Image: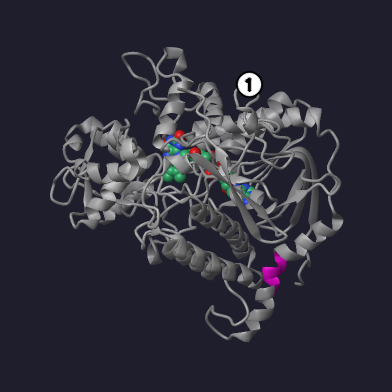
Amino acid sequence: MGLFGGRKTVFVDADILVIGGGMAGCGATYESRYWGRDLKVVCVEKANIERSGAVAQGLYAINCYMGMRWDENQPEDHVRYARNDLMGLVREDLGYDIARHVDASVHLFEEWGLPMMKDPKTGRYQREGKWQIMIHGESYKPIVAEAARKAATEVYNRIMVTHLLMDSAKANRVGGAVGFNVRTGDYYVFRAKAVIIAAGGASHIFKPRAVGEGMGRTWYAPWSSASAYGLPIQVGAKMTQMENRIVLTRFKDGYGPVGAYFLHLKTYTENGYGEEYEKRWYDDTKALVGEYVDHHPVPTCLRNHALLKEVAAGRGPIRMVTKEAFQDPHKETVGWENFLGMTIGQAIVWASQNIDPKHINPELTTSEPYVMGSHATCSGAWASGPEDYAPAEYQWGYNRMMTVDGLFGAGDTIGGTAHKFSSGSFTEGRIAAKAAVKYIMEKGRDQPQLSEEEVRDLQKTIYQPMENYRVGRNEIVAGTVSPSYLLPIHGLQRLQKIMDEYVGGISSHYMTNDVLLNRGLELLGMLKEDMNRMGAEDLHQLQRVWELHHRLLAAESVTHHTLFRQETRWPGYYYRGDFMKLDDQNWHCFTVSRYDRNTGKFEMEKAPVYHIID
Ligand SMILES: Cc1cc2nc3c(=O)[nH]c(=O)nc-3n(C[C@H](O)[C@H](O)[C@H](O)COP(=O)(O)OP(=O)(O)OC[C@H]3O[C@@H](n4cnc5c(N)ncnc54)[C@H](O)[C@@H]3O)c2cc1C
């Protein structure tokens, strides 16, 4: 079969195109219909929205719920909490906007059938922690997807979006997107008046701890392949805080979550000799970050820092003390159910390693870094804020619109707003959709014009790896190493090694400096040169190629941002060896980048942090 033989090209016109049908994408699709009754709302997803995204396997807790109807927390409290955890740097306007609406989203989930745990005494949602409520959440994603399916005009599953298209008639306006069906190979061209990117965060950019037979076992979903960043970066949308990668302390080897254990089961940690160790590192941490170490709760990165220091001092491994809590049959049940509802792999790893937490305190370790905007870090696109709340400098258009006209984002896509989690991501999708409908009504009624030439060129580019493989395969008789093409797994491992060794991954103990980062950029540049020599033996591998493209762009962005910020703001997430201290005087600001696809260069600038809430 030739390059295009047997494959159809499918053209789809839409008013709103939602890319990615995870939590934020489902929220965006649902809300687009609410405000845009007559609009054509299309959701495109590379898997199947029924079980796609980071919530695919289910969750045991909704991590962002204010409880305003019971006066448990107010939105301002959540902003203070996120600001504290991120060492002072969050977009308070965006965070407040999510917090004031998130409860309504959670109430919708309950209405749609999500089983919520209730406190038998008060009748309120069962709290796991100050912000978390407990759910029987195995079917969380199918429930949310059903609402999106009913709201959408069309859902296109199994289509990997590879590139955004720009309006050829209007400068800096988005026009749609292209991609391919990962099962049939058909080429899809979407034209849309507004595009909402909700394509999840980025795993597998840094070398993971689990390699060889364990490869693919990561904390964040392995299919979170950085499209949320790669797509907007390609078209010049500004990004922020890309250096703010996250490192998680999790149960060793299975990456099982620890939140329910700490918060609900009241477990605690100790070093290999059964000693408390966090206090031991107080002075050391204070010397790096000053008074931030005295904040309550202690910021996540600083707790990682104490753990890393203790292990480096030779007193590992760090263990979670579960033996006490698990003597209580109720707590034991909760401990296991916590995994069975969302990380079954951890229960299996424990079983395979003879670990019964009732009798053995399991080991904890820190993960490789991930890039994302919805968890305890806030990498992502630089977005316009809410009209009634954002400072003027943060408002250039519609709420959650990026610096490209008509291009919106939500969830992991949007930067500056940590701690939104599943419910906050869904809520942000709703916020973005409402603004996108307004944008269409006021400004974008006309369909964008697409360049036929660009659409044709992209078609050739997208499928070229299959042609590279078809031709190059003849040069070798066995094995997978070819003189003329690079397989996606090879490219991925090369990317991970560069990021790991030069940009602060696990093998360098999260340490980097300007020399390493500059060399890392050179090596990433060489990998980029080789990307047009990728070979794909089938459509599945073709998807891997395009995921790698997105990961590579995101990785370059992370490296530029890390180089730009000359301080160590989040010890425990990463360290700049040449600037080991937090420097509020010079770096109490956001880092913002813009990629120019014509020159391949990233331009960096600082943006002010406004503290709107006292
Ligand atoms: C291990 C783990 C545990 C978590 N625990 C909790 C918890 O206990 N409570 C909580 O509230 N939150 C939790 N979260 C966070 C929550 O899952 C995320 O905040 C949320 O899913 C982010 O929403 P999103 O829409 O941005 O990304 P996702 O939900 O991941 O959705 C992204 C979607 O985009 C699709 N996609 C990606 N690239 C493309 C492309 N190129 N073309 C088309 N489609 C594409 C993906 O297939 C996916 O469906 C957890 C996350 C993880 C990974």
Question: Is residue 94 in sight in this rendering?
Answer: yes
For image coordinates 20% across by 40% down, the residue present is 279
Residue labelled with disc 1 = 388
Between residues 225 and 97, which one lies in front from this camera angle?
A: 97
Disc 1 C-beta below 8 A from ligand 1: no
In this picture, is 322 found above or below 385?
Answer: below
Q: Residue 178: horizontal and vertical position, in percent? A: 73, 52
Which quadrant holds the N terminus?
A: bottom right
> Does 188 appear in magenta?
no
For image coordinates 52% across by 34% down, the residue present is 609
Question: Is residue 136 in sight in this rendering?
Answer: no
| Magenta-colored span | 463-467
In this picture, is 515 found above or below 217?
Answer: below
In this picture, is 106 found above or below 208?
Answer: above
Q: Residue 185: horizontal and vertical position, in percent? A: 70, 60
> Does 464 appear in magenta?
yes
In this picture, is 307 found above or below 328?
Answer: below
* SS of the residue under disc 1: loop
Which quadrant holds the C terminus?
A: top left
